[in-house]
Amino acid sequence: MTPVQAMIAKELRGYFVSPVVYVVGAIFLLIFGFLSYLYVVYAGYQAIQLMQMQGGQAQLNLNDLVFRNLFASMRFVLLIILPILTMRLFAEERKLRTFEFLMTSPIGINEIVAGKFVSVFLVFLSLLGLTGLVPTVLMLFSDFDWNPIWTGYLGMTLLGALFISVGLLASAITENQIVAAFLSFGMLLLIWLISGLGALLGDTTLGQIISYVSFMDHYDRLVRGLIDTKDLVYFFSSLAFMLFLTHRVVESTRWK
């Protein structure tokens, strides 16, 4: 077993013996299911209205009425859920006084950071996989285009990875798990709100730069079914930058 695999196994054991992951996972799935139900009901209401107006069978686009709205709404959910999942990663090590032991172990900082990130990402992917039941069930009752759904899930995966990396950085900064959760939430909210400033500045050079920094536009394009190289570059470069910062923070505390 490689050092990264050992770290992943250690973190996953810690997650699945804690009730937090089960509670957070259940809340995540319940919210996803509830939002799906609301948007399906809304689509049905729209269908009834169209049938009354046209006097025949209504043709509705579930991609627009259900899935696009659903994926857009999940940004808010991830903004709250993922900081809770990541708050323990380094903060708990410091609280339990195992951080020093971890730093003096044969495992390098790169392996520690990578292992902790991958462990949470795997938990997130497992939750995301369970939500696939919604489009699978709806497929039995209606026809829709799967391409925007795949890109929507790609967007949620990349956005989740970015949020996890921010949460990992926040957890490396403090030994208090609650502080880590709020710090992660605050950083993500700030990045989110930056998009509003970019919109105010319009098509100016500064406005375009500020808008690019926020994940809003990049995620929205994926939700709409558009895969652009610059959006993929944004997510992967932002993820790498956050993991680099986490590495530097952990390394700096190693010698304190």
Image (cartoon, grey):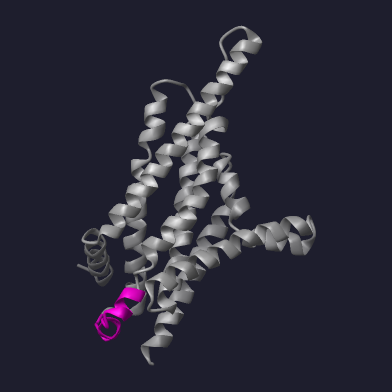
Note whether residue 6 is visible.
Answer: yes
Q: Position of residue 50 (x, y in %)?
A: 62, 16
The single residue placed furthest to the bottom in the displayed view is 256
Q: Nearer the viewer, residue 172 or 248?
A: 172
Q: Position of residue 169 (x, y in %)?
A: 45, 72
Q: Position of residue 10 (x, y in %)?
A: 23, 67
Q: Nearer the viewer, residue 135 or 84?
A: 84
Residue 68 lies, with reference to residue 49, above or below; the image says below
Q: Quadrant of the N terminus?
A: bottom left
Residue that appears at 41% across and 20% down: 141
Q: Is residue 159 left or right of residue 30?
A: right
Residue that appears at 43% across and 67% down: 181
Residue 226 lies, with reference to residue 47, above or below; the image says below
Residue that appears at 47% across and 74% down: 244
Give the quarter of the image for residue 133: top left
For residue 133: magenta?
A: no
Q: Position of residue 184 (x, y in %)?
A: 48, 67
The single residue placed furthest to the top in the displayed view is 55
Q: Is residue 90 left or right of residue 223?
A: left
Give the quarter of the image for residue 30: top left
For residue 104: magenta?
A: yes
Give the quarter of the image for residue 194: bottom right
Please provide the residue range marked out in magenta: 91-106
